[in-house]
Image (cartoon, rainbow, N blue to C red):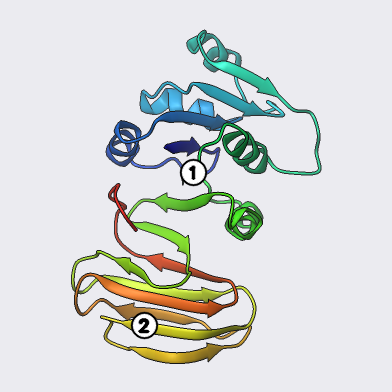
Amino acid sequence: MTALLLCNGEPPPRRLAHRLARHAGIIVAADGGANTARALGLTPAVIIGDLDSLTGATRRAFPGAEIIRLRRQDNTDLEKALDEIHRRGIDRVVVLGATGRRMDFTLGNLSIVWRYQGRLQVLFAGDGWYAVPAGREQRIHAPAGTTVSLIPYGPCSGITLRGLVYPLKDASMAVGVVGVSNVVRRSPFSVSVRRGKMLLVVMESFTPGPV
């Protein structure tokens, strides 16, 4: 089962949000993400967070939503939502609105994905891009010419790339070394990272299906 999680960052394109909602088993809003859901014409089943950004108009717009208020401030609303999604036995989540003008929130939101590895498959998506943690032997469909970047969050080794203009075989990347602007040569391309934490960013609108 896949959850669609809406956050309070940059709103996603309406068409993307509705396409992903059609393939989701449940829609969850992280606090002010419910305001975004309302603007997009989506109805969350769950609204969760400290609720400091949830407007009264939005609360009234979703009388059937389960509203969970967690006052604790030692984690973010995104983390609160991911914890609740995992608690419900859902194993896959697509996150919209996790990036935007607040650079601190953007970097923080992307980095917490490592906390959930092995528990949740987390994919971040936005206007013309998506990002996932790179693991072992991922085969990814994307049109030839699509830009692909690899961002290490620490030392990584055993990196093998196939189907890209700049392939690698059993390579390593140190902290601060980034592999930006590689290009898809044939689809599906494959990425394998044996050790370390690596974020794979694909500059293509996400289409529900295997990644």
**Residue 40 horizontal side relative to residue 9, left or right:** left
Q: Earlier in the sequence, mark 1 or mark 2?
A: 1
Quadrant location of residue 154? bottom right
Callouts 1 and 2 close, C-beta under 8 Å? no
Give the x, y percent position of residue 149: 41, 74
- Mark 1: which amino acid? Gly
Residue 97's disc number: 1
**Residue 142 horizontal side relative to residue 78, left or right:** left
Residue 153, placed above or below residue 179: above
Which residue corresponds to mark 2?
A: 161
Q: Secondary structure at mark 2?
A: strand
**Residue at screen point 44% across, 68% down:** 200
The quarter of the image holding the C terminus is bottom left
* Foreground pick, 171 / 16: 171
- Mark 2: which amino acid? Leu
Give the x, y percent position of residue 205: 29, 54
Label 2 CA crowd tier, 10 Å (few <14, some 14–19, many 20+) = many
**Residue at screen point 72% across, 29% down:** 50
**Residue 87 horizontal side relative to residue 209, left or right:** right
Camera sees residue 99: no
Camera sees residue 42: yes
Label 1 CA crowd tier, 10 Å (few <14, some 14–19, many 20+) = many
Residue 8's disc number: none
**Residue at screen point 31% across, 52% down:** 206
Q: Secondary structure at mark 1?
A: loop
